[in-house]
Amino acid sequence: MPSTCTYSVEVRITPRKGILDPEGETIARALDNLGYEGVGAVRAGRLLRIEVDAASEDDARRSVENMCEELIANPVIEEYEVLVAQGATAP
Amino acid sequence: MTMKVGIVRFPGSNCDMDVARAVTEGLGEEAEFLWHKSHDLQESDVVVLPGGFSYGDYLRAGAIARFSPIMREVLAFARGGGLTLGICNGFQVLCEAGLLPGALVRNRALRFRCHPVGLRVENAETPFTTAYEPGRRIEITIAHGEGQYVADDATLDRLETERRVVFRYVDEAGEPTDRANPNGSARNIAGIMNDAGNVLGLMPHPERHALEALGETDGLGVFQSLLEAVERRRVGSRNGTSPFDSSTPPIGVYT
């Protein structure tokens, strides 16, 4: 039996390029109204932290990438990034 | 009775009763509720995914409902040519399930919008719209926060060419202006169908405008059309001919 380890995996989901992001645009306007200078584009997304028991970092990543493809992200409108760290704390 | 309409109930569905009353009181036909955990469509002629906030709209609207147990049967029914209607949250579920192309995202203005909108019947030769005059303008209520229809240009062009844009948001003059677009949907699209022509998704709520008692019956035509389609299929199968007549697109396999 290969020993497994707990990985903390972070998934960052953002609207795909070319998809309107009204939430991000609204936040950008609000920052501008508050007087913050130099604020460019703002994209608003979603962050998930998932604890995964896996034999290796690669296995943990593959497993979460499968989750993203099937449920967590909608490829029509979203893109995602998967970051893996060992131990049950966030990367 | 001619038609049995199965209405799927997910946790958080809240327009299921309205659909049932449109079918039973509006048409005098039969409605059956289908619990999301069951695997039985109860021999329904039509399956409706009603509006609401299935699973609290967690993750994305419709994303979790898509994996409900009953969706296995709904997908098989729809892929086999069964008449399937998704209203509001039901439209979102159909897109998430891949039965319809594109997706529905947050309204452009970020507000939940609940008011009547003008719609133009763009294609009156579908199982969902034969009761309407082609090009007719109707008024139906929307009630959604995530109803902005998006798809890539190639998909949008294909939808237009194949006349699969069934309803479009229009102003008082019947024109699809930007002002008439309540949520920023691409090309003012309010409702689309699959390429086989047996699955329709739309954001507005025809079931809320199906009874005289509620003052408006512009939405009853959708259910009336479904009844006509079911009748045509019955006659077709009795005569041993195709269940579709010339006004209904042939069954294809959705890819």
Image (tube, coloured by chain):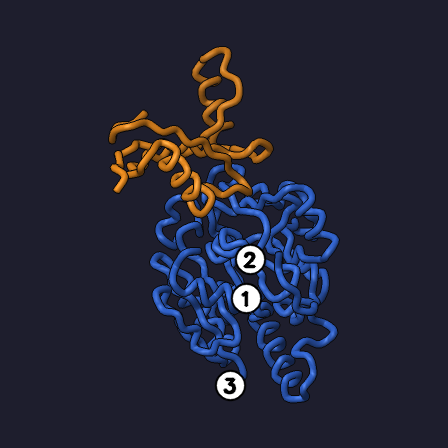
Compared with residue A56, is residue B146 higher up or lower down, i.e. above or below?
below
Q: Are marks 3 and 2 in contact (CB under 8 Å)?
A: no
State the separation of the CA atoms marked 2 and 1. Answer: 8 Å
Residue designated by label 1? B78
Which numbered tag is attached to residue B1? 3
Circle 1 Cα neighbour tier, 10 Å, few/some/many (<14 / 14–19 / ≥20): many
Pick whichever of labels 2 and 1 is earlier in the sequence: 1
Q: Colour of chain A?
A: orange
Where residue A40 sits in the image (x, y, percent)? 52, 18
Circle 3 Cα neighbour tier, 10 Å, few/some/many (<14 / 14–19 / ≥20): few
| Viewer can see residue B88 | no
Compared with residue B243, is residue B170 higher up or lower down, i.e. above or below?
above
The answer to which of A65 and B45 lies nearer the viewer is A65
**Residue sitting at 45 percent across and 22 percent down?**
A30
**Residue sitting at 42 percent across and 75 percent down?**
B32
Front of the two marks 3 and 2:
2
Name which residue type carries label 2.
Leu
Q: Quadrant of the C terminus of chain B?
A: bottom right
State the image quarter where residue A5 is shown: top left
Q: Are marks 2 and 1 on the same chain?
A: yes
Q: Are marks 2 and 1 in contact (CB under 8 Å)?
A: yes
**In this rendering, would A75 be left or right of B65?**
right
Q: The residue tagged with tag 2: helix, strand or loop?
A: loop
Residue designated by label 2? B99
Name which residue type carries label 3.
Met
Name which residue type carries label 1.
Ala
Q: Are marks 3 and 2 on the same chain?
A: yes
Where residue B15 sits in the image (x, y, percent)? 42, 62
Where residue B182 sits in the image (x, y, percent)? 56, 45
Q: The residue tagged with tag 1: helix, strand or loop?
A: helix
